[in-house]
Image: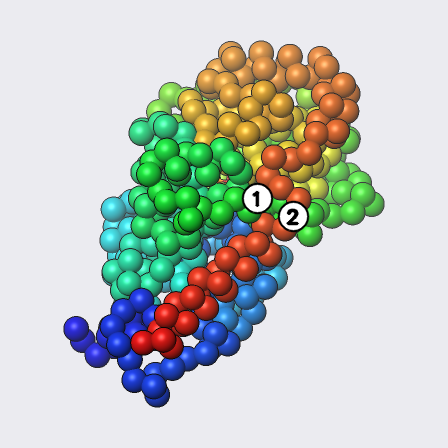
Amino acid sequence: MEPARRDLVQRSGFGAAARASDVVTAADARIAIVFGTRPEVVKLAELARRLEDAAVLVNTGQHWDDAMSGVFLRDLGVGRPDHVLEIGGLSRGEQIGEATAVLSRLFVDVRPAAVVVQGDTNSALAGALAANAVEAPVVHLEAGLRSFDRRMPEEHNRVIIDHLAEVCLAPTEVGAANLRAEGIAPERIFVIGNTVVEAVRRLLPPPEERAALLRSFGVEAGRYVLATIHRPENTDGKALAAVLAALAAVPVPVVLPLHPRTAARVASAGLGPLLAGLRVVDPLPYVAFLGLLAECGLAVSDSGGVQEEVSVLGRPVVVVRRSTERPEVQGTWAQLVDPGPALTAAVAGLWADLPAIHQRLAALPSPYGDGTASARAELAIRQLAGRGLTTFCRE
Ligand code: UDP
């Protein structure tokens, strides 16, 4: 074994015998946090803040522009990443391969007591593979989500990450049951809620700021639709025209912050005219997006995070997807539809009964917990790091 690697294994306490001079205390333990996209920043921010100096922040650069990444790091108070990679714009295979290679070298230097990844992105998978390659334990935040839809790359990513992880932090019992059904040992599974709850609570602007925000968009509370569309199943092929035509047919203002991938597909497919009736804007900073989501009549989205956020904000969402890995919100906050006429019909159906729906949703507790998921995650991670060190110290 090469010296750097042997040192890593010893110091993390997951390997061979060590010299007394190698002893590191729990206070020295470094926790690498790997992220690359805006939803990962949203969901890891509070945990990173809690881990303070122990956190080593690694941005893979999967989302590289300021509107999709930099503004999220600033607004969520994450601070400057300690290490930045540049995997944005590469193919899926290249992103996973290149990030895994670079991260595994980085982990040899950093010697993390644990590596935290979140969700189901290529960055998260690369972080887990790289940690596994240097025998550092993986902590998977948002573990156990399953769409059972093998056409989605994210489904493959999340299954692999969960099986590599030493600790699976599931948002709900549904996720925990999925993990147990796949044979993951119960002692590796913790149900902690979803960290998006505390992100929403911390970043949601107060009512007077929301009112000013709505004025700047020229919309009235409860009288507009907020839409986001970015998944390949909706942006590649014929679906995009069907989704945009359905949004254009909605008889109230539709605010559409356009994801870079969607904007590129609109341009290449010549679908610009379908945007004419919509209020198209650049991707919004999180605070502004939350403000608009809290005050909309309803949302239309293919985003995972938005399905969770509406459960905190008490708004209904029409989910334009073939499948979902978030059954907890289906039939209450969320309704799954195919792109096209079913989308128009679902919006019309909800709109007809909106005040009663808002009232009903306001009374329902979010299935994603009470805003303590980051604190629970911190505890589990510190215990894991401490356990590794204790094992090491006994040798
Ligand atoms: N979001 C945002 N600004 C926007 C659109 C979305 O801040 O213009 C936030 C949204 O609130 C959610 C996250 O971005 O927290 C979702 O990101 P995305 O849809 O890219 O990924 P997914 O959640 O589907 O993985």
Q: Is residue 329 above or below residue 90?
A: above
Q: Are marks 1 and 2 in contact (CB under 8 Å)?
A: yes
The one of 261 and 142 positioned closer to us in this rendering: 142
Q: Which callout, 1 or 2, points at the residue further toward the start of the chain?
A: 1
The one of 177 and 201 positioned closer to us in this rendering: 177
Q: Residue at x 63, y 51 (%)?
A: 372
Tell me the distance, in whole angstroms, between the alpha carbons under discs 1 and 2: 8 Å
Please identify the quarter of the rendering in which residue 246 is found. top right
Q: Which mark is residue 193?
A: 1
Mark 1 neighbour class, 10 Å CA radius: few under 14, some 14 to 19, many 20 or more: many
Amino acid type, mark 2 = Gly
In this view, the residue farthest toward the front is 394
Tell me the element at label 1: loop
In this view, the residue farthest toward the bottom is 21
Q: Position of residue 18 (x, y in %)?
A: 28, 80
Q: Quadrant for the N terminus, please.
A: bottom left
Q: Residue at x 46, y 38 (%)?
A: 176
